[in-house]
Amino acid sequence: MKYLAALLVLVSPSFALAEPLVVGLWPGAPPGPPAKVTGPEINQTKPEDNLIAGRPLIRLGNVNAPEVHVFLPTKEKANGSAVVICPGGGFSILAWDLEGTEVASWLNEKGIAALVVKYRVPTREYDVPGKWQGPVMDTQRALSLARSHTADWGLDSRRVGVMGFSAGGETAALAAVRRGQRLYDKVDAVGEVGCHADFALLIYPGGIAGPDGTLKSDYVVTPETPPMFFVHAADDKVTCLSSTALFTALKKAGVPADLHIFATGGHGYGLRRTDAPVTQWPRLALDWFRDRKLLEPRSSEPAAAALPAAGPPR
């Protein structure tokens, strides 16, 4: 944790974040395919790597001990909504600050709790579904963990969503369409709590459409699928057909969804603003949050009993 905190100060000085609560996701060895690590967990960014909006990013690799980093808004701003964030990285690394902690900071400013999932990577070398099974399990576990702490974290269990970027968008989408269909056997009391997403934001997601642009069979959309928000650029090499295919299925099922396709913008910009219009998407997302009433103060609900964390905070 100290290693990551130091990196965030050095690499992303414009984002001032309070130290998060770090919770191990599993009480023992994680179920499902392990990450194919080649060494210790480390930032794999090199000096010659491309900058995003003039700044480097943390490319966290060799993650074999999944965690969730919990960032809570101040009590004055908190509205009870929560978002589980899945950074991208092609199932090889995690774009930890660009698509993780910087997003958490933005959400906290809007009163939304943010849980950044440090899911297992690399898993890219597995055949499908092995490539995404572990990351989706970690994400489902994080959704359950959020609901198991509604009382002590000040959350509304009916307003827990998921958000993902690139490969993290694929992970978030798979967790969302499963609507609580857990990919793993329950291992403790946290597993008794729902692992579904109440809403989903998918930012330049990949892997959802096949080569012909149609929705892959892994994505079964029903009227019970949660509302979704999409952002993509038409010139993104990670084709925008993934967004349009899932949006079309949602439309046919009568599920509310917002789709924003920009002519240009490329891939992998996170929340960092440039001259590209696509980087104004956070304003559109904020409007969507308002429309879904996710920024309103938490409504009263029966308090969920706080359950023990899956792993010790560090």
Image (cartoon, rainbow, N blue to C red):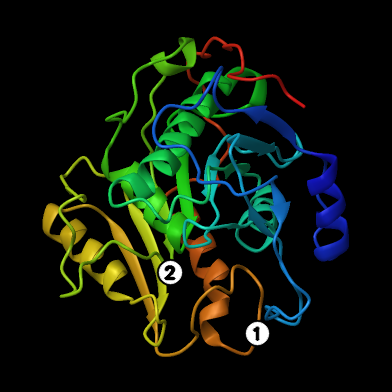
Residue 107 lies, in percent from the top left, at 63, 51
Left or right: residue 73 versus residue 291 is right
**Mark 1: which amino acid?**
Thr
Residue 211 lies, in percent from the top left, at 20, 73
The foreground one among 13 and 57 is 57
Which residue sits at x=57%, y=88%?
276
Q: Which residue is mark 1?
A: 274
Query: Which numbered dot is residue 173?
Result: none
The foreground one among 291 and 10 is 10
Neighbour tally class for label 2: few under 14, some 14-19, many 20 plus, Cα within 10 Å: many
Image position of 92 with respect to 300: above or below: below
**Quarter assignment of residue 118:** top right
Which residue sits at x=56%, y=17%?
27
Neighbour tally class for label 1: few under 14, some 14-19, many 20 plus, Cα within 10 Å: some
Left or right: residue 211 versus residue 126 is left
Q: Which residue is mark 2?
A: 204
Q: SS class of the residue under badge 1?
A: loop
**Mark 2: which amino acid?**
Tyr
Left or right: residue 301 versus residue 297 is left
Q: Quadrant of the C terminus?
A: top right
Front: mark 1 or 2: 2
Residue 198 in sight here: yes
Residue 63 lies, in percent from the top left, at 61, 44
Residue 250 lies, in percent from the top left, at 20, 57
Residue 159 in sight here: no
